[in-house]
Each structure stands twice: as C-alpha cells, then as structure tokens.
Image (cartoon, rainbow, N blue to C red):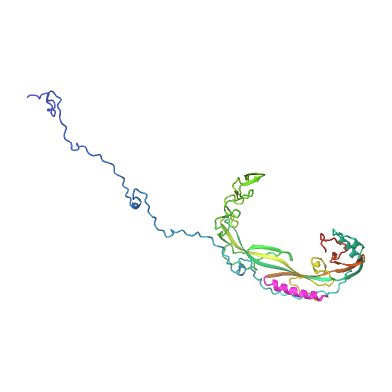
Amino acid sequence: MDSPSQDSVPGYETMPTEGGGGLLPPPTLSDQQPQPETQPSCPNWDVPGYEKMITEGGGGFLPPPTLSDQQPQPETQPSCPNWDVPGYEKMLIEGGGGFLPPPMLFDQQPQPVPQPSFQKWDFPSLSKDDAQQAFIQYASNKRCYSTKPAEQGVITNMESFDTYRYRLVTFTETRTTERSERPHYGEKIDNSGLTPPGPWEIPVNVPPFFQDDSHIVEIPHTASVTRCFHCSARGYTTCGSCGGLGRRICSGCGGLGTVYYGQNRQFCIVCGGSGRTICYLCGGTGETTCDVCSGQKMVIAALNLVVNWHNDVEEHTVEQSSGLKMSKLDNVPGRELFTDSNYMVYPVTNFPDPTVVQVSERLLREHQDKYLKNSRILQQRQTIELLPITKVTYQWKGESYVFFVYGRDFKVSAVDYPAACCGCCCPIM
C-alpha cells in the first residue's frame, strides 16, 4: 500500500503551491463587517412622585401639601393668675386692698363703768421767781435778743388761764388683702383644693396694745403655680435702662463722640468716639432677669392677708381767752388728771368743765361710727390733761409788756419782746 506523500498535509493542500508560501483565505465571519460603536445611555431619572421637580434638568419646585395648621399661629401669652378666691370677692375689688368688716361681737357697745368724782384741782400757782427765770432762759436762747428786759423788767401782774386737753386713742386692727407672686423653684405648694378660711378666721399674734405694727401672712389654700405673666414666661424682660438696645448715650461726651480738652477737640476716652457705652444694667444684652420670677419662668401666685394695727388719735384742747395762740399748745406736755383704758371706754362724766364731757361723747361716737365699719377695735384709752397757762405783765423802761408761761415745762411766748433783733434770724416763740 502506497504511503501518502510527505508533502501532502490535510487542509494545507492549496498552501504549498509553488514550493510553499501559498495563501489560504480565512473563513467568512458573520461579524466581520465593522459595527458602529455603542454610546452609553443617560441614567433613568423617571422617579415616581418627582416628575414635576425634574423638568428641564432638575431644580423644579413641588409645593408642599397643605396643612391645617400651616398658617402662623399667634404665640400663646401666659394669662394672669386666677384671683377669684371664695369669700374674698369684696376684698379683691380693683386689685385687692378692699375691706371686709369683722364679725360683730356681742359686747361691741361700751358699758358704763364707775368714774372718779372730779373736783377742782388745786395746783400751786406759778411764782414770780419761776416766771422770771423762765423768761430769762427764753431770752438767752435767742441769739440776737438782749436779756436786759427779762432780767431788769418788773413783774406787775400774773393771771392764770389754765385749760384742758382731752385725748382719745383707739387701737384698731384692720385686715386687707394683696396679690403676691414669687419665683417657683419646684417646691411643693398648698394646692389641696380646700376652701380658704375667712380673713377674720386666720389667727395672728396681736402686738402689745397701742403699738403700731403690721403682719403679712399667706392665706391657706390660695397658692397656684402659673407661667410668669410679666415676662411672658421667658425669664427675662427688656432692659429698662437702655430700652433693649444694649448701649446708652455716653455720659462723658453726651453722645457726640468728641470732647474738648482746652482748645483741642479729641475723641472721647469714655466711649472711644462712638458716643455710646455698654449699658451697665444689662451688660449690653438688652435684657435683664425678670424681677418677678427671677428667671424661673414660673411663679407661685397666692393671696396674702395684710394685718395692720394702728393708733387712731384724736384730741381737743378747750379754748381759753388768755391771748396765747392755741397752736402753741399742740405739742406741749401737760399734767395728767385722768386716764381710762378699756376694750371700749365710756364717755367722761361729772367733769368740772362741761366742754370736756361734750368732747368725750362726740369723739367716742365718731370713732365707733368710723372704725367699726372696717376694723376691729381692740382697745381704747382716754386721758385728760391740765395745761397751765400764766399771763405775766411786766414793766421795762416805763412801758408795759406781756409774756406767757405755759405747759408743764414752762415754755415762754413773748410776741412783743422789747429788745428783739431787727428782723429775722430768731423765730419768735
């Protein structure tokens, strides 16, 4: 069997033509023709719900949904505390301070009590020596008076014009209310909801009789915690010194920014030329801590009971015809003849001077009508004083003059003193 030729290779028969180097065309490929290059596509921006916002490359606006509370609401301001307290309605008219009459007492009318039998008091008359010594002392105390008329004058007549002073003192207790607000620091308060006691049911310690005094106590069951109305619960208020600006007109230059030093005009060293300085009160913030809540924003509102004890004094001096001005006797101590003190005193009876009896009846009636309406009378005291008055006539250099010695401590009045100064540096007593 003939073996195949060594030069014949299956599949290469057409390539070794003419000693080799023949060409064998490649097989035809379906993608042998050049294809156009595929460009990348844009991202897909179609997102549900955002179609209107992506128009023209994005940046579109989509209105928000309409909300029921979309319109701005006015800020809720703290309301004033509720001051409607049962039993205190009449006392809270026009912000408090009203009066509520005390309950009637069974023994509110004064009861007659035995009084001593008054008689004409026989006090030693003023001697001439005592009168002249008082006169000399009077002239010596006047810087521009000569003492010669007092020392050399001759007393020719002394006449007594003693009179009386009636004084009535009514010691009363008055109860009013006031509204109070203080900072709330988180402490517990009396808010049990119980009915507050009446103004005259709250016990207080009474001071000694005839001593003016006052006392403030919080009325039980009236406290409540509320937002501070004065600062709108912010804890601070607009500075009252700078009006919220934080700066004030410079006190060194009056706001001009410049001052004169001699002939030279220079920038003010206080404000640096600005004409304004930082407010000393707020430190430049324009705000200060609320005075009511002390920055706590919450306050305890309560009703306070204000108790006042007061001496209501009325006095009357019986007229006299000596010629001495009645005003001279206003602050002069006299000699006490009678004193009577009781819950409610009874008018004076059987006194030698009927004017004193009439005055006693009138003033006691007026005090009862006046003070029993809004106050409680705790004690009354009536006194009668003798005011000694002596009219002294004396001669000096042939002329007659008059001076008066009055009161328990020998006060002197000499209107026509003959050796007074010209005018005016020494008040005449």
Q: Position of residue 51 (x, y in %)?
A: 33, 52
Side (left or right) of 9 relative to 358: left
Pick the quarter of the image with the C terminus: bottom right
User: Closest to the observer: 269 or 114?
Assistant: 269
Q: Residue furthest front?
A: 263
Pick the quarter of the image with the N terminus: top left
Q: Position of residue 374 (x, y in %)?
A: 67, 70
Q: Position of residue 200 (x, y in %)?
A: 65, 68
> Is residue 361 located in the magenta-colored stretch of the structure?
yes
- In the image, the segment drawn in magenta is 351-374
Residue at 64 percent of width and 46 percent of height:
259
> Is residue 299 located in the magenta-colored stretch of the structure?
no
**Residue 366 at least partly seen:** yes
**Is the residue 259 above or below the residue 387 in the image?**
above
Secondary structure mostly seen in the magenta stretch: helix
Q: Quadrant of residue 104?
A: bottom right
User: Closest to the observer: 4 or 352?
Assistant: 352
User: Closest to the observer: 18 or 161?
Assistant: 161
Q: Quadrant of residue 87?
A: bottom right
Residue at 66 percent of width and 67 percent of height:
175
Side (left or right) of 176 relative to 385: left
Q: Quadrant of residue 363?
A: bottom right
Side (left or right) of 157 relative to 59: right
